[in-house]
Amino acid sequence: MAQLQLADGVLNYRLDGPEHAPVLILSNSLGTNLHMWDTQIPMWTQHFRVLRYDTRGHGESLVSEGPYSIEQLGKDVLALLDALGIARAHFCGLSMGGLIGQWLGINAGSRLERLVICNTAAKIGSPDTWNPRIETVLRDGAEAMRELCDASVERWFTPGFSTVHTEQVKRITDMLATTSPEGYAANCGAVRDADFRDQLGQIQVPLLVISGSADAVTPPAGGLFVQERVSGAEYAEFQAAHLSNVEVGEPFSRRVLDFLMAR
């Protein structure tokens, strides 16, 4: 692990893979940390220098005053690339990480080689969804985070997966349980306020959109909406709920790899 000093705190990150390989940056979902990508690392580090980081408010990164914005979180990514001397990189983000990817594609496409956004949408939910959750988390703190863990199992995984793969599910929900309530609420605000529906046509980099057919948080319709509005974008759908990279594993990893290595 390493840390980048930002103006208001540190951004925790990790590099794996060959030093001179192309860089692939991974962005976590709301309520997880950089270890949500552990399943993908063995395959992807055979071809890429993989740069993972804890989004502001998560893991070992700074918890600054919220609410955050997706623009702010996107600029954290650019600061990390600048600090490491990385001119261009591939980017793969899931859920909130997919919103960050969309912002980068719209506003900083010159820094991207190829872009993958997973289990996301141009707009996720509404204030009626997010505001009560923000209020509850800020009021009840750690107790609210523990209650979110139970609810998140149903949102993040299909029943068949969560019943059989209890250790993997616990590994992910433990990330949520240890997330700062203040950081979580601040990121909820960022997701609540993000809306890229009218800007998607500005994305010019090669794009792959991945959805989960059983994803109630960001259903396939949201992924298809993005794919249809970005010229040349590819689309893939797996039998999975919200955290498709964890639930699908190797087929997910292979589909992303095939896209990133296409010529």
Image: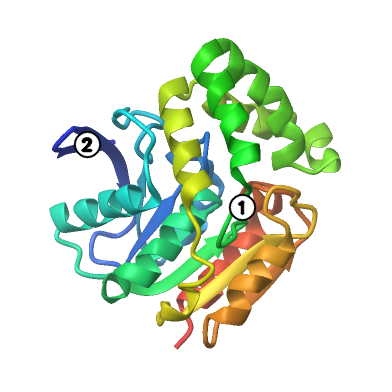
Between 153 and 248, the residue placed more toward the observer is 153
Between 229 and 232, the residue placed more toward the observer is 229
Residue contact at pointers 1 and 2, CB within 8 angstroms:
no
Q: Quadrant of the N terminus?
A: top left
Amino acid at dot 1 = Asn
The residue that mark 2 highlights is 3
- Tell me the residue at 47%/30% (across/down): 184
The reply to whether residue 132 is in sight is yes
Q: Is residue 54 above or below residue 206?
A: above
- Tell me the residue at 29%/67% (across/down): 21
Q: Quadrant of the C terminus?
A: bottom left
The reply to whether residue 171 is in sight is no
> Dividing the picture into quarters, in which one does residue 5 lie?
top left
- Tell me the residue at 34%/28% (across/down): 60
Between 188 and 36, the residue placed more toward the observer is 188
Secondary structure found at label 1 = helix
Mark pair 1, 2: CA separation: 25 Å
The residue that mark 1 highlights is 245
Q: Residue furthest front?
A: 128
Q: Is residue 150 shown left or right of residue 119? A: right
Amino acid at dot 2 = Gln
- Tell me the residue at 47%/25% (across/down): 179
Residue 248: percent from left, percent from top: 70, 54
Label located before the other in sequence (1 or 2)? 2
Residue 101: percent from left, percent from top: 43, 61
Secondary structure found at label 2 = strand
Q: Is residue 213 above or below residue 10?
A: below
Residue 185: percent from left, percent from top: 48, 29
